[in-house]
Image (spheres, grey):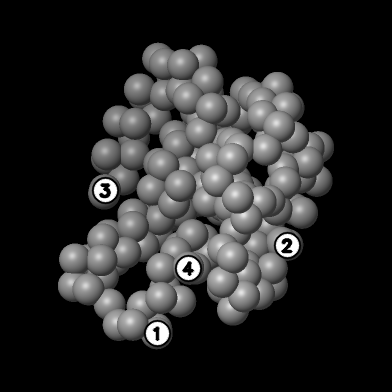
Amino acid sequence: MKSTDLKTIEKDVHKNREALIERLVGFAVNDVLLFWSTDKKVHNEQEKKWTPIIAWANKTVKGSFKKTTGLEVLKENEDMSLKFKEYLNKMTDKELSCFYVAALNMRSVLLALALIKGKISALEAFELSELEELYQARIWGSEPIAETRRNNIKDLLICTEQYLRT
């Protein structure tokens, strides 16, 4: 992705801001950081690396996103919709467009928020979003297609971070 692509997305965000925010709010309950592994080693990594991001995001949006090891969306996370929507409405079009691109590619509005607000770098965001997959790749090896996908996401996040900071 190039900065010109992000500029185009920013223009689209301006035109479709309300619908985009609704989509992101709906996406928030399925955030990858809210669904934890039952594998003890992965869970320990998630605890160490994801807990600080969830705590920071909760403080930032004045909310209480909760994690689970189940497949069901927790009611508490559904109740976060209004607060999260209010927070997104305060973003500039540039911030919201970068947030949108990052959130969709990482499957995480919480990591996108941390990236947009400068809490973490693009590389940190990438590693956190791919934590379980990278863990599995260390154990079992990596498929070339998966490696290409991860590299594309990493490059996109770096480009997004650079665009946001200009």
Mark pair 1, 4: CA separation: 11 Å
Mark pair 2, 3: CA separation: 31 Å
Mark pair 1, 3: CA separation: 34 Å
Between residue 9 and residue 78, name the one nearer to us: 78
Name the element at disc 4.
helix
> Which residue: 40% across, 14% down?
15
Labelled pair 1, 3 in contact (Cβ < 8 Å):
no
Between residue 137 and residue 75, name the one nearer to us: 75
The residue wearing badge 2 is 52
Indicate which label's residue lies in the foreground, 2 or 3: 2
Name the element at disc 3.
loop
Question: In the figure, 151 relative to 84: above or below?
Answer: below
> Which residue: 68% across, 57% down?
53
Question: In the figure, 61 relative to 66: above or below?
Answer: above
Labelled pair 2, 3 in contact (Cβ < 8 Å):
no
Query: At label 4, which amino acid type do we have?
Result: Glu
Mark pair 4, 2: CA separation: 17 Å
Indicate which label's residue lies in the foreground, 1 or 2: 1
Q: Position of residue 12 (x, y in %)?
A: 35, 22
The residue wearing badge 4 is 132
Residues packed near mark 2 inside 10 Å, few (<14), some (14 to 19) or many (20 plus) = few
Query: At label 2, which amino acid type do we have?
Result: Pro
Labelled pair 3, 4 in contact (Cβ < 8 Å):
no
Mark pair 1, 2: CA separation: 25 Å
Indicate which label's residue lies in the foreground, 4 or 2: 4
Name the element at disc 1.
helix
Q: Position of residue 36 (x, y in %)?
A: 60, 59
Between residue 163 and residue 134, name the one nearer to us: 134
Quarter occupied by residue 6:
top left
